[in-house]
Image: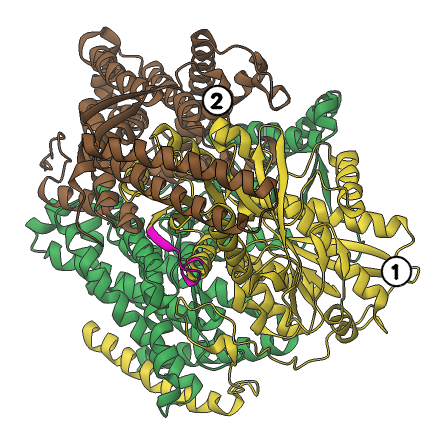
């Protein structure tokens, strides 16, 4: 009984959240609507890749391919058939999500099969190659827009997609979570931890691997379908290798195998470059410009601070107070170093002459954040942990145990 | 597409080898690092890019800068050697730095974490390069710097003799028509327009015949610069193989590659070996970058390394990653396959076919062409 | 047990989803179903314009406060940065000059730049942010794909958009707020076709297209159509990809088709190496291309081989027109040297055109500024005299054919739009 109550309540919460968020964002801050949609898509992508990569341990680095299959299939179908069928716009969106999922599941099957024979880096390059092949083929088919891209405008106007995107993300998270929490998930984890041993224990390794690929890519396909309808325009360039890399980074940065981690990392990594835009403030009417010496000084300081923080985490133990002082001191030291070096660099006229608009720095800061986070927490933000109240309490009370890979 | 033109096949095969030598050169560096560390060094392409810029700056310092256009200094092989050394040195330094700052701290972490760090480093170099490197407009190394600008041509089958005679005859007619038309124009005669038209039509005939003769000739043309690249690749491969198989350092590398911990227990200075591997691998990237930028003279941008980096990675995997002759074989094979695809008229799909070949090869030989596929031990 | 519950969860989810849809059905956005004329036409390689521009549905913002904000979307990161940077520099130059001259109605102008990161999705984010910040007009982008996304945002917001380098023809159908200062694909191709046919006396031309670059694909298409319409023959088309460096395989193919000229529709970054490798392969026929060639670096990457090539351009740095010389000297004073790509001049023109329209506009409302841009006649731009009145957003302006020489580009011939037919 309790089981059903919990399930129903969480379902209700999810739906309430999806529709509520959609209506609220559309009403009060329409400009954030698109960003919310994109962030939601990245959550789905990251969690679904986590299923393949983190939970089943199959090294796939071509997730953008499945994203693309979903987007192009549904974009094409929508353009051709939306006008000739009776479904309303909302139902059509869901139908398209399902279609995208189905199309990508087939693609996932095609990629999943070689995974039976390959492992590790060899599998990685095959998944990467698959993505590139699809992208290049798409680029060469002029019927779907070629290198320019394809308009997806069956509705002829703006579309409300956020609620579908949020439901999709919710579905993806809950399926992955249920897999991890139930007996169904054990074979996946077993395959990740030791393929040979799990096979000896009677796990059907092949079917587990292929299932992971199919489920993971199906969600990516559904996300692609939503991208096509939310953006109303798709082009092969939107599914470059970089996109796959970013999704992979979200998974690893969040903590391989941790669903919570993927969700958080997806939102954070998507948010950083977008947040940095807002630093160019029209209220003060000044485009923020960073002098060359400050940039270089901060780069040096970041390097030294990271090194310092690593040393502190290795050497300083004991109570919370001691550690807080050590960490705080390191950060403070970093700030001083940044200031010192910027003064020194400022003496060099060539450097002092440089000025960088914050727009130019966005991506550098993004990449730097990535490196720093990886160096400070190689096991990812959440490690193998999932968010739970007990976990949160443990985190505050004592040092969490390091996860083993 | 029309049928395949067999007369250009020999030339296309040579083109493929030359293209492949570029991939092979970069793949050597990839494979070195992978062989020892089992780390896909995604930043390799960026080291390559920085090497190209190092060569560009050196060429500017040697007096071939943008302001010297018009009267550049005399070209010399010495300049090329200087550029090569600077480029290799700069890359070795950068490679060692990257290893020290970004990869060494990750040594005991899961490999996927190192991979993400590598991606991060690669993105960082690309975008930071966008801030500091000259790129608007993308600069190219002046062609004046290299004395090896000629081409080598071997004619396998000369054009038919009668065609040559026809061409001479048309050429004479063209000259005559030209002077007639010009004279008429100078005197403003009414028939000037007609004569001009006649001259132009003969000119077109001449072009058509010259072209025809040209296309009936079977020949192989090899630019000297690209030939040098191919030879260098093969030499470097031999040297590298010698280092890895015959020297003490090489033995240490192989030991580290086999097992980090045991190698350390046996007294191998693992840190030093890894640094050395990065230095050698990156210096190779530098050598490749310098030749690439000088011979092909592509305009440089901070994203220059991405495409060659991926291609070289594919080449390395194709040959069996970690295997030195494999990298060269993989590179050359990819060059030839890509060229043949273009030859067959599917140029749009060229990059895709490289991956298709890779996937097919991996399905049959999961360890690459020359690599050994290890059976996992329990 | 577990298995069953999962299945049940699925079933419940599906049911709930269906229920939810019927619920949402009533709040379907009212804008839906207005039928996308023009752009709603599905995909396809067909880029020709229908000539029908969607009317705006909203009135758009108006200037509040003491500053006039103009947005510019440009690639500040990524592989299009060289072009994006130049467009920023050019636009900034125009804004600075206008401010130095007292601004508009005593209000200073501020240029806000948004980074497109060489990507349509990020470009749309940037445009959205600019529109939020209250810009009264948007400039950009350099690439057609990104511009299409920006055009969507500006259309929905009722803000005028002046594209800088987006040449795709059907972009102008997106809305009546869309304008551009560059040529469309449909113009440059015919210019070069006429020049090749009449002046170079060519009949059998081969094309090399950068398949990754929509600009290049579009230009090649329109050249092919125009050249064949004149009676010429396209003997071969080779498709390479941006950032390739070794073109010998394409060149061998091309050479065997025996062309008497080669049309290169890509950017100078690839054109330089291609031409030098063409010559190495022993092909000595004339080469010519579009405005993607325009860069001082063309000569350094193309070397001696490129000398004697022709391309279509907007202006020529040796022109004596006052606009050109003023622009070049202002550029030199602020940034040193000459603009690296043609986007410097186009960015300058786009910003000036916007500022000029704001001055001419009856009010500082977006709606009236759009009307003012739409009535532009003989605007003296660096890239020629621009007329937008009655042109459906696409400028009517002359094209120059310039010849590459060792000491820079030399004027060869000028074509006005009327001359092409």
Asked whether C340 or A24 is in front, the reply is C340
The answer to whether residue C333 is left or right of residue C345 is right
In the image, the chain rendered in yellow is C
Q: Is residue C392 above or below residue C99?
A: below
Q: Where's the N terminus of chain C, which quadrant?
A: bottom left
The answer to whether residue C115 is left or right of residue C357 is left
- The residue wearing badge 1 is C104
- Chain B: its colour in the image is brown
Asked whether A114 or B254 is in front, the reply is A114
The answer to whether residue C375 is left or right of residue A52 is right
- Chain A: its colour in the image is green
Asked whether B24 or C194 is in front, the reply is C194
Q: How is the image coloured?
A: by chain
- The residue wearing badge 2 is B143
- Magenta range is C227-235
Please state the horizontal and vertical placement of residue A298, each as a whole percent of the image. Answer: 64, 32
Residue B270 image-quadrant placement: top left
Kindly tell me whether residue A405 is visible in this rendering.
no
Residue C228, magenta (yes or no): yes
Mark 2 vs mark 1, foreground winner is 2
Q: Could you tell me which secondary element the residue under label 2 belongs to?
A: helix
Mark 2 — on which chain does it sit?
B
Q: Residues within 10 Å of mark 1 (few under 14, many from 20)?
A: some
């Amino acid at each position: 009984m309790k089981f059903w109550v919990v399930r129903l309540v969480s379902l209700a919460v999810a739906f309430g959240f999806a529709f509520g968020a959609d209506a609220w964002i559309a009403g009060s801050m329409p400009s954030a609507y698109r960003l919310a949609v994109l962030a939601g898509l990245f959550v789905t992508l990251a969690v679904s890749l986590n299923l393949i990569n983190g939970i089943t341990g199959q090294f796939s680095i071509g997730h953008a391919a499945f994203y693309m299959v979903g987007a192009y299939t549904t974009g094409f179908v929508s353009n051709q058939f939306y006008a000739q069928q009776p479904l309303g716009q909302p139902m059509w969106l869901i139908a398209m999500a399902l279609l995208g999922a189905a199309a990508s599941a087939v693609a996932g099957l095609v990629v999943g099969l070689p995974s039976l024979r390959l492992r590790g880096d060899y599998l990685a390059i095959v998944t990467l190659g698959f993505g590139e092949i699809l992208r290049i083929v798409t680029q060469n088919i002029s019927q779907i827009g070629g290198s320019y891209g394809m308009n997806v405008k069956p509705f002829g106007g703006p579309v409300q997609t956020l609620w579908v995107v949020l439901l999709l993300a919710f579905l993806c998270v809950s399926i992955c979570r249920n897999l991890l929490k139930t007996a169904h998930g054990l074979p996946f984890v077993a395959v990740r931890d030791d393929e040979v041993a799990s096979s000896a224990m009677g796990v059907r390794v092949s079917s587990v691997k292929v299932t992971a690929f199919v489920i993971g890519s199906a969600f990516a396909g559904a996300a692609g379908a939503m991208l096509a309808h939310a953006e109303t325009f798709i082009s092969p360039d939107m599914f470059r290798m970089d996109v796959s890399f970013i999704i992979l980074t979200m998974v690893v940065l969040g903590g391989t195998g941790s669903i919570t981690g993927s969700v958080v990392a997806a939102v954070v990594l998507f948010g950083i470059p977008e947040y940095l835009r807002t630093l160019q403030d029209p209220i003060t009417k000044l485009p923020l410009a960073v002098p060359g010496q400050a940039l270089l000084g901060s780069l040096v300081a970041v390097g030294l601070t990271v090194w310092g923080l690593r040393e502190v985490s290795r050497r300083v133990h004991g109570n919370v107070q001691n550690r807080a002082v050590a960490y705080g001191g390191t950060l403070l030291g970093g700030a001083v170093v940044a200031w010192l070096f910027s003064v020194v660099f400022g003496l060099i006229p060539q450097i002092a002459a440089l000025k960088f608009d914050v727009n130019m720095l966005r991506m550098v800061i993004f990449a730097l954040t990535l490196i720093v986070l990886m160096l400070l927490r190689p096991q990812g933000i959440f490690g193998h942990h999932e968010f739970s109240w007990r976990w949160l309490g443990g985190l505050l009370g004592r040092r969490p145990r390091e996860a083993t890979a | 597409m029309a049928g395949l033109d067999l007369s250009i096949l020999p030339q296309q095969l040579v083109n493929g080898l030359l293209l492949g030598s570029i991939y092979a050169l970069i793949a050597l560096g990839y494979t070195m690092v992978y062989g020892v560390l089992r780390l896909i060094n995604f930043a390799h392409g960026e080291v390559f890019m920085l090497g190209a810029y190092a060569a560009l700056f050196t060429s500017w310092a040697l007096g071939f800068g943008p302001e010297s256009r018009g009267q550049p200094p005399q070209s010399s092989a010495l300049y090329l050697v200087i550029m090569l050394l600077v480029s290799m040195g700069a890359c070795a330094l950068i490679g060692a730095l990257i290893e020290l700052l970004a990869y060494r701290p990750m040594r005991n972490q899961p490999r996927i974490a190192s991979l993400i760090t590598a991606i991060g480093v690669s993105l960082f170099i690309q975008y930071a390069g966008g801030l500091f490197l000259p790129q608007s407009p993308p600069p190219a190394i002046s062609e004046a710097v290299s004395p090896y600008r000629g081409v080598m041509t071997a004619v396998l089958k000369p054009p038919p003799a009668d065609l040559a005679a026809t061409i001479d005859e048309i050429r004479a007619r063209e000259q005559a028509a030209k002077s007639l038309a010009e004279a008429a124009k100078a005197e403003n005669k009414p028939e000037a327009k007609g004569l001009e038209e006649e001259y132009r039509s003969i000119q077109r005939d001449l072009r058509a015949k010259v072209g025809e003769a040209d296309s009936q000739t079977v020949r192989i043309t090899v630019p000297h610069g690209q030939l040098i690249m191919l030879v260098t690749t093969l030499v470097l491969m031999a040297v590298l193989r010698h280092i890895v198989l015959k020297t003490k350092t090489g033995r240490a590398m192989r030991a580290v590659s086999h097992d980090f911990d045991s190698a350390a227990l046996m007294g191998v200075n693992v840190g030093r070996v890894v640094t050395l591997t990065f230095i050698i691998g990156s210096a190779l990237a530098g050598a490749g970058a310098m030749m690439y930028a000088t011979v092909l003279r592509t305009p440089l941008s901070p994203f220059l390394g991405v495409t060659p980096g991926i291609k070289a990675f594919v080449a390395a995997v194709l040959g069996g990653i970690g295997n030195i002759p494999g990298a060269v074989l993989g590179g050359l094979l990819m060059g030839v396959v890509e060229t043949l695809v273009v030859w067959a008229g599917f140029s749009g799909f060229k990059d895709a076919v490289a991956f298709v070949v890779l996937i097919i090869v991996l399905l049959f030989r999961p360890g690459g062409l020359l690599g050994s596929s290890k059976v996992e031990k329990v | 047990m577990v298995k069953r519950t999962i299945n049940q969860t699925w079933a419940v989810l599906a049911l709930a989803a269906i229920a939810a849809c019927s619920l949402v059905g009533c709040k379907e956005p009212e804008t839906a179903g207005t039928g996308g004329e023009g752009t709603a036409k599905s995909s396809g390689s067909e880029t020709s314009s229908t000539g029908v521009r969607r009317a705006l549905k909203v009135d758009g913002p108006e200037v509040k406060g003491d500053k006039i904000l103009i947005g510019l979307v440009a690639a500040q990161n990524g592989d299009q940065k060289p072009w994006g940077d130049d467009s920023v520099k050019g636009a900034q130059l125009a804004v600075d000059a206008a401010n130095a001259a007292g601004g508009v109605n005593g209000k200073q102008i501020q240029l806000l730049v948004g980074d497109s990161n060489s990507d349509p999705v990020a470009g749309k984010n940037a445009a959205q942010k600019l529109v939020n910040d209250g810009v009264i007009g948007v400039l950009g982008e350099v690439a057609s794909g990104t511009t299409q996304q920006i055009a969507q945002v500006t259309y929905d917001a009722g803000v005028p958009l002046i594209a800088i380098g987006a040449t795709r023809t059907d972009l102008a159908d997106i809305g009546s707020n869309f304008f551009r200062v560059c040529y469309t694909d449909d113009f440059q191709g015919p210019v070069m076709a006429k020049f090749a046919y009449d002046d170079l006396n060519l009949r059998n031309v081969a094309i090399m297209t950068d398949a990754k670059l929509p600009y290049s694909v579009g230009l090649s298409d329109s050249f092919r159509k125009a050249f064949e319409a004149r009676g010429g023959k396209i003997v071969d088309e080779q498709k390479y990809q941006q950032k390739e460096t070794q073109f010998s395989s394409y060149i061998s193919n091309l050479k065997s088709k025996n062309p008497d000229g080669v049309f290169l529709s890509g950017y100078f970054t690839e054109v330089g190496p291609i031409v030098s490798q063409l010559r190495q392969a022993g092909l000595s026929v004339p080469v010519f291309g579009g405005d993607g060639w325009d860069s001082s670096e063309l000569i350094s990457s193309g070397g001696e081989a490129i000398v004697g090539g022709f391309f279509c351009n907007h202006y020529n740095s040796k022109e004596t027109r006052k606009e050109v010389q003023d622009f070049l000297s202002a550029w030199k004073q602020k940034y040193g040297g000459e603009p690296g790509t043609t986007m410097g001049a186009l960015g300058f023109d786009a910003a000036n055109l916007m500022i000029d329209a704001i001055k001419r506009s009856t009010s500082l409302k977006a709606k009236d500024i759009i009307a003012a841009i739409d009535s532009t006649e003989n605007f003296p731009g660096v890239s020629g005299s621009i007329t937008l009145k009655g042109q459906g957003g696409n400028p009517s302006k002359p094209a120059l054919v310039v010849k590459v020489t060792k000491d820079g580009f030399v004027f060869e011939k000028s074509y006005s739009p009327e001359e092409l037919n």
